[in-house]
Amino acid sequence: MSINVDKFSLIIKNQINKYEKPALLTEFGKVVSVGDGIVEVAGLSNVVLNEIVSFENGSYGMALNLESDIVGVITLGNYFDIKEDSIVKRTYKVMEVPVGDELLGRVIDPLGSPIDQKGKLKTKKRFPIERVASGVMTRESVNEPLETGILAIDSMFPIGKGQRELIIGDRQTGKTTIAVDTIINQKGKNVKCVYVAIGQKNSTISLIEKTLEKEGAMAYTTIVSSSASDTPSLKYIAPFSGIAIAEYWLEKGQDVLIVYDDLTKHAIAYRTLSLLLRRPPGREAYPGDVFYLHSRLLERSVKLNKKHGGGSITALPIIETQLGDIAAYIPTNVISITDGQLFLMTNIFNSGQRPAIDAGSSVSRVGSSAQIGLIKKVAGNLKIDLAQYRELEAFSQFGSDLDNETKKVLDHGKKVMEIIKQAQSSPYSQLEEAILLFIVKNKLIKWVPLENIGDFKKALLLNLKGKKCFTTLKNKMDFTPELEKEVTKEVKGFIKDYVLKIPNYDQDQIASLKED
């Protein structure tokens, strides 16, 4: 049997002609200078913004300053043994973080590495930290409430899914408490939560984790932790890592709540990096693009329409003020970006009113469109009542002779302030809020002494839960005229029994209550 050598030769030649070996290109650069976590690199002419580069010592950095001949790189690890003329390699990857349900219940650093001693993350999916926000045509108006469980907020300054509501105030006024209580209240409501700690003390972050664990909230929460001891680069990356994690669930059509605690420290970290990168300083030494820094971050909070999945990201950014100065640079920037603000006052906090929300300065630009009909029906007069109370309270300080009508308004206002006072980690359901607002609207608290209001509202809610009117209200979720009469009758009956147990109760008040 003869072998056709020419045939085999032709096959081999065809295979050789088709063989293509891809060119392996690796771009190298050299360290020009290093100091304070900033490395200047020459030779990386094609590097892109936010691209990860690797150093000879095994650590990584992120390209943040792109100039014609020098690239400014912020280090993401140990930079003390990076030396001049050492080699820097491109990785051809932008900064990414792991995303997925595996992150729930975990505490991670801004790079996505777990720091909670619970083992490695098993997620394989990663999202870039910088993404273009969803376009206008993919969005819809905010129309669904995100329940905070805090009566003062849900009644007067409702937050909707997809909204950006700023929490602003001096230090130690309860800003973080409001955010953490809101996370706790999402239990059983199918809302994923991301808490981003920026420049917080390790002890504070640990306490928040323990609080969420105790309340069963860590099961649906991820904590992105950048402590005060971390480098400015990690503090800068932290909120962008948090929003990237939130966008994974957004794309799955789910609702997410993200807390940035706080953006003041974030702006300071960015200012530090910008000054070290020799960017021109502007007002208060912040760089010119500090507004863009927060606007591109907060713009990624969105309520998508049904065509694009119907998911939402609700943002609660926190800003710390100095001596209540909301006209400072960063506060005014973030106020102009967000859809409202909750302004917390030191004097209100020190007077024992918690949450210490200043009803006059606070606002929600979404308004009643983010409230259920039940709350909307009974919450309308609350802000007016408090406005009248504040006005008359200011005038009453200058005179002792007050007419009976003024005294009634002041007495009612003080009792309303007690009604909306709320302890930490004690959220109300929408039904409980509706009942408390109902008794305020109908002035049914006029017979209850001021000092007994706190105990009275707990006892009332506990008593009504076993009544038929409570079950009817729960089923209908609306105050019909018949139901209003039934609830009023039950509340008045409870008040009669309650006040008779109070020692030295005013006999005239008892007579008035019996007549009514």
Image: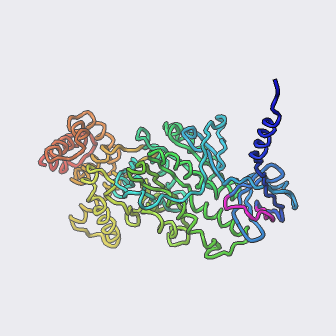
The reply to whether residue 243 is in sight is: yes
State the extent of the magenta-drawn residues as a range. Answer: 38-50
Picture quadrant of residue 29? bottom right
Q: Is residue 45 in the magenta section? A: yes
* Residue 453, percent from left and from top: 32, 48
In the rendered view, how is the structure colored? rainbow
Query: Quick one: 50 or 104, which is closer to the camera?
Result: 50
Look at 44% across and 44% down and name the residue there: 191
Estimate the x, y position of residue 296 in percent, counting from the top left: 54, 63
Q: Residue furthest front?
A: 2
Provide residue 370's location: percent of width, then percent of height: 34, 55
Q: Residue at x 33, y 41 (%)?
A: 458
Query: 71 and 510: which one is in front?
Result: 71
Quarter of the picture holding the N terminus? top right
Looking at the image, residue 346 sits to the left or right of residue 110; the answer is left
Q: Residue at x 50, y 72 (%)?
A: 327
Q: Position of residue 454 (x, y in %)?
A: 35, 46
- Residue 425 in view, yes or no: no
Give the residue displayed 26% in from the left and 70% down from the top.
Answer: 401
Q: Residue furthest left?
A: 515
Residue toward you, 419 or 136: 136
Magenta region, main secondary structure: loop
Image quarter of residue 163? bottom left
Q: Is residue 62 magenta?
A: no
Relative placement, left or right, of 182 versus 284 is: left
